[in-house]
């Protein structure tokens, strides 16, 4: 089946945060929304058909997870990541963010420290602070637009209260797909200091040619025994509204601690349509994904080439994984407020302000490229109309 990713789907009027709430978020009328990390594409046909079939039954009672659900997760991770997992390692969560909250509470106590690598997905910050833990930030190294882990810095910042490392893999927002040796060195540091790893791998299927995602827990039994891996079909197949995530926990004690924490928070049963969609996506969605990835890569190539030719002051980070581009506007010398005004008010382009990912993101913007190419082209036209003049100011 051929999918038409050029098709523009009108998402307004569907209570869509990305489109229906953009004016409120950006404080301006009609910004072109390229911020919230969901796609403007229809989900794969097998997923839509599976949801329709289940809806036609007409009874939507409490729902468990069948054998076929677990088989789909095991089969997908085996095929895509080369990671052989057991059914007993799999549990669920409403989403990866809630899984991270639960995992922090299960693996540590209030006052303990949690390390993150900044700039990073900002819900990590609130997950640490809202659970009463102490946030430790280790900045990634930006080497001529290429980001690397600063493992010396990270190891220096470990103290006697450090219990957890939250890994973003692939990394949001800088789009790095970490190499095996990078992950191995990080895992060795965590092992030496007896630090547990919460690995957010929600973007693990969105990796481009020349790069390969490796689950950190798949590298060794030692790493697996200290890691909670969080995955979901939400980013891969545009199913974020269906609230279906998985946690993979090979170590029995950690699994019991996670389950106990989820139970104490009143989290147990899974969204009915989330179960249906996850199974259909992992069982029958590969063809859609294989067509999606080159399309997103071409969106990136178009944006990169357009900016190189017309606005070379904007530095574009290489897109290794995710559908989120990371743009550096610092050569313009604008403050965070001035950059927001130029983009949101003057150009009416709704990029995500990089400063929310940490102070290392000041002067950057995150751009969601999971949209029809016409939207990317319109965004570049709007950008050129404003930043060509800023160059002259």
Image (tube, rainbow, N blue to C red):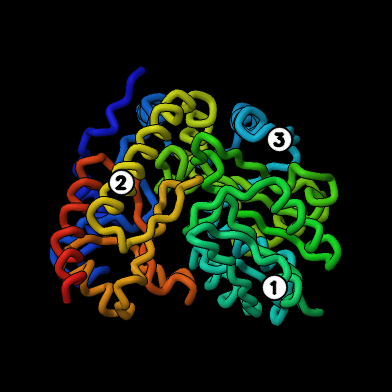
Dividing the picture into quarters, in which one does residue 264 lie? bottom right
Quarter of the picture holding the N terminus: top left
- The residue beneath circle 3 is 83
Give whichever of discs 1 and 3 has the lower sequence position.
3
Query: Is there any visible trace of residue 48 in the rendered image?
Result: yes
SS at mark 1 in the image: helix
Camera-nearest residue between 373 and 319 = 319
The answer to whether 376 is drawn above or below residue 22 in the figure is above
Quarter of the picture holding the C terminus: bottom left
Q: Residue at x 67, y 61 (%)?
A: 103
Q: In the rendered view, does 88 fall on the left or right side of 308?
A: right
Q: Are marks 1 and 3 in contact (CB under 8 Å)?
A: no
Q: Residue at x 67, y 72 (%)?
A: 114
Farthest residue to the top: give it.
1
SS at mark 3 in the image: loop
SS at mark 2 in the image: helix
Q: Measuring from the top left, give residue 199's x and y in whole percent.
A: 65, 54
Q: Residue at x 49, y 57 (%)?
A: 174
Q: Residue at x 40, y 48 (%)?
A: 241
Per the model, the C-alpha gap separating discs 2 and 1 is 35 Å
Give whichever of discs 2 and 1 has the lower sequence position.
1
Callout in the foreground (3, 2): 2
Q: Measuring from the top left, give residue 255's x and y in whole percent.
A: 75, 52
Camera-nearest residue between 32 and 329 = 329
Per the model, the C-alpha gap separating discs 3 and 2 is 36 Å
- The residue beneath circle 2 is 305
- The residue beneath circle 1 is 153
Q: Measuring from the top left, give residue 155's x and y in whole percent.
A: 75, 71
Callout in the foreground (1, 3): 1
Query: How would you rate the neighbour count of disc 1 (Cα within 10 Å): few for under 14, some for 14-19, many for 20 or more?
Result: some
């Amino acid at each position: 089946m051929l999918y038409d990713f050029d098709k523009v789907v009108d998402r307004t009027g569907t209570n869509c945060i990305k489109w229906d709430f953009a004016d409120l978020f950006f404080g301006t009328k009609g910004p072109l929304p390229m911020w919230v990390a969901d796609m403007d594409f229809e989900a794969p046909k097998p997923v839509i058909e599976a949801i329709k079939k289940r809806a036609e039954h007409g009874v939507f009672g409490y729902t468990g997870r069948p054998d076929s659900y677990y088989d789909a997760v095991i089969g997908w991770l085996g095929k895509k990541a080369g990671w052989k997992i057991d059914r007993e390692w799999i549990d669920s969560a409403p989403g990866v963010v809630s899984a991270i909250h639960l995992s922090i509470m299960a693996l540590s106590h209030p006052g303990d420290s949690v390390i993150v690598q900044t700039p990073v997905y900002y819900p990590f910050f609130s997950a640490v602070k809202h659970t009463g833990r102490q946030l430790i930030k280790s900045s990634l190294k930006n080497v001529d637009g290429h980001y690397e882990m600063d493992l010396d810095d990270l190891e220096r910042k470990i103290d006697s209260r450090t219990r957890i490392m939250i890994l973003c893999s692939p990394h949001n927002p800088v789009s790095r797909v970490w190499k095996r040796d990078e992950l191995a060195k990080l895992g060795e540091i965590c092992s030496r200091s007896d630090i547990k790893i919460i690995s957010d791998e929600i973007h693990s299927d969105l990796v481009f040619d020349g790069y390969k995602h490796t689950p950190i827990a798949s590298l060794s039994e030692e790493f697996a025994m200290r890691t909670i891996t969080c995955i979901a079909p939400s980013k891969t197949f545009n199913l974020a509204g269906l609230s279906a995530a998985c946690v993979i926990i090979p170590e029995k004690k950690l699994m019991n601690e996670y389950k106990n924490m989820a139970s104490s928070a009143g989290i147990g049963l899974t969204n009915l349509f989330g179960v249906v969609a996850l199974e259909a996506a992992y069982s029958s969605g590969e063809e859609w994904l294989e067509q999606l990835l080159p399309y997103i890569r071409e969106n990136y190539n178009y944006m990169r080439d357009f900016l190189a030719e017309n606005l070379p002051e904007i530095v574009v980070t290489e897109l290794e994984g995710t559908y989120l581009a990371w743009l550096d506007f610092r050569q313009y010398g604008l403050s965070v407020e001035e950059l927001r005004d130029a983009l949101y008010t003057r150009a009416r382009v709704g990029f995500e302000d990089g400063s929310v990912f940490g102070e290392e993101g000041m002067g950057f913007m995150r751009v969601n490229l999971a949209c029809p190419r016409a939207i990317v082209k319109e965004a570049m036209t709007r950008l050129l109309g404003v930043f060509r003049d800023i160059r002259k100011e």
